[in-house]
Amino acid sequence: MEHPERWHRDQFRQHGPFGLRHRHGHGGPLRREPADRLGGGVAAGIAAWRGFSPTAVRIVFVLATLVSAGWGLPLYVLAWLFIPAVGTDANIFSKARNDTGGIRLAVGLASLLIFVLLIAGALNGGWFISWAWPQVFSVAGLALIWRNGAPEDQATLRHLLEPLGAATDDVKPSRRSAWRLVIAAVLLAAGLGWLFSAHASLALLRPLGGVLLVIAAIVLALGPWWLRIARDLAVERQAKARAEERVDIAARIHDSVLQTLALIQRRADDPQKVIQLARLQERELRSWLFEGRSPDDAEEITVADGVRQIQQDIESRYGVPVEAVTVGDCDLDENLSALLAAAREATVNAAKWSGASVISLFAEVEPVEVSIVVRDRGKGFDPGSVPEDRKGLAESVHGRMTRRGGTATVTSAPGEGTKVTLKMPRSSLTAGRS
Amino acid sequence: MSTPRVVLVDDHGLFRSGVRAELGRQVDVVGEADDVQPAIDLIGELLPDVVLLDVHLPGGGGQAVVQAVKASHPEVRFLALSASDAPEDVIAVIRAGARGYVTKTISTAELADAVRRIAAGDAVFSHRLAGFVLDAFAGGPTAEVKPSFDPELDQLTSREREVLRLIAQGYTYKEIARELFISVKTVESHVSSVLRKLQLSTRHQLTRWAAERRLA
């Protein structure tokens, strides 16, 4: 049972990042490639699937959009909705189907656009209108992707919506709405009057000027509603960020406070040790809460530093020797810090539960990813029978890794020890520098 | 197989007597030396099967002993030992001709086993040496690497890399064999081949890597 993501990464490695050197595709199912994306990773996905260069696919797509008067864009959005991302089997649409709020938003946005286009069309908008019609579907689709997509999908859209979010801040609702509507009505009347007046000398400019005035009127009348929708999107984004933060805090507290409490219970017969542990924990918690410093990033600058820090901490706290080997090195970023935190958690688990006399910790920095293997020859366990409330491996290790695009594999069997393999892709920031 | 005859070379008397007491029953410790010149003389005289050699010696380091003895008695085999593990020193001793490297924290049983394997002509890689070697051969050949007379010497095969990774994770040869579905003999031959590459490669990067490490 090969892991789909690893399989994909191997493909990626063989063919190089741009896929320019290979002629045939990977032979697997069609998947979007968020790793190599400009939008939803559709072009890159098709490229990898059929073995083309992503750049070529993109050029063909742009040409097709030009020829089909804009229908390429909604098609792209549809593909984004219906093709699952690499490593997953569920597409965004399967999630969006049950999202009534999202569907309402999509219908609202689409009807708004239809309204605008109907008016503009009635006023003879020319080629612009025929291009804009397909975008009704694009807008609805993008709204659904925004509500239901993976974090990286949302990040891409956020990039596009950022200016709108900023614009919502200086809108004061209802105070000036009466004035606004009056001005809108005047503009509308002027625009319509201009359009239907028979002024011979301005014949050529007439449609254009009229359309401009009508659009200005629509923006004035309906703009606030539209901005409110954009603001709702921003609020939703914040809520998501808060939820993620909460999960991170829970993991952090589990790592430090709960672990120390467990240790204190086991050492209850040794008052000296209990005091020492409590002090240590107090220091950690204070520095994290009041100085905004996480307890384990004090001296961690590179992966090797971090591994050394884990080795020292585990050896001094649990008295179990840790044999650490690091191959290569690179600076830490957020993802790699999460990887180290997960590795620390796995090592703590091994020190506490395995009963092994030594734990080995192996880290390797490669051009595309960083992997850490934590291994012991201790008791081992049956991975299927870990109770739900013992959150160590499940949340701290697995959750931490997958939230940031990494993977965690645990192999263990009773009596045969445990091996935790963690892999985190390197971001473009740290990749290449080693 | 007969008990291997061993000479201990280490500048710490305490360590020598400790190893001698622990290994006494499993190998035949025929002599001890505490510095480079005495060691060269003693080894030339006793011609042991295996020399347990401290990487750090006051009079020039373990590699001086290996080089001098290899010149006149190539059949003597060396197993390097060290507590401090500076990678460039370890690699230097291996490149001088030692057939393996273990840390001083190794258990007695493992050390005795390592001595026997060296005596039998195998290579012995500790988890740390495996890490160093992976590091030194990282990145594959690049344009700036001056090719050796045999370019295969300049890079590790993916299988050799895999074996080294598992050694670095603390796997024994037997466990590696099971993990990779190969025989223990095959694992040994992979390790020997890595050792050969390490010693014979003129890979420019090996030297540069060591130089960088020394600066850091």
Image (spheres, coloured by chain):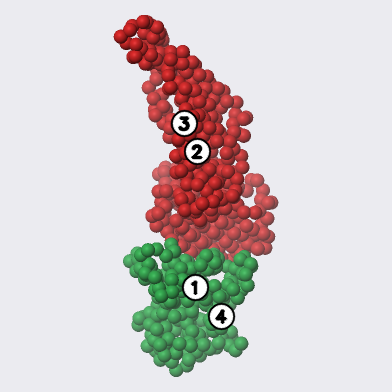
Chain colours: A red, B green
User: Badge 3 sits on which subunit?
Assistant: A
Query: Disc 2 or disc 1, which is closer to the eye?
Result: 2
The reply to whether discs 2 and 1 touch (Cβ–Cβ < 8 Å) is no
Give above or below for A290 relative to A140: below
Earlier in the chain: of badge 4 and badge 1, it is: 4
Q: Is residue A94 visible?
A: yes
Residue type pointed to by label 2:
Gly
Residue, x 52% and y 22% (percent of image)? A110
The reply to whether discs 3 and 1 touch (Cβ–Cβ < 8 Å) is no
- Respond whether the residues carrying marks 2 and 1 are from the same subunit: no
Residue type pointed to by label 3:
Val
Residue type pointed to by label 1:
Val
- Respond whether the residues carrying marks 2 and 3 are from the same subunit: yes
The percent position of residue A307, horizontal first and vertical second, equals 47, 58
Residue, x 34% and y 14% (percent of image)? A204
The reply to whether discs 4 and 1 touch (Cβ–Cβ < 8 Å) is no
Alpha-carbon span between mark 4 and mark 2: 56 Å
Give above or below for A241 relative to B155: above
Q: Element type at marker 1?
A: helix
Query: Disc 4 or disc 1, which is closer to the eye?
Result: 1
> Dot 2, how many residues are within 10 Å of its Cα: few (below 14), some (14-19), or many (20+)?
many
User: Badge 4 sits on which subunit?
Assistant: B
Q: On the image, numbered disc 3 is attached to which residue?
A: A67
The percent position of residue A345, horizontal first and vertical second, equals 54, 53
Q: On the image, numbered disc 2 is attached to which residue?
A: A40
> Dot 1, how many residues are within 10 Å of its Cα: few (below 14), some (14-19), or many (20+)?
many
| Quadrant where the N terminus of chain B is found in the figure | bottom right
- Residue B117 got which mark? 4
User: Badge 2 sits on which subunit?
Assistant: A
Q: Element type at marker 4?
A: helix
Alpha-carbon span between mark 3 and mark 1: 59 Å
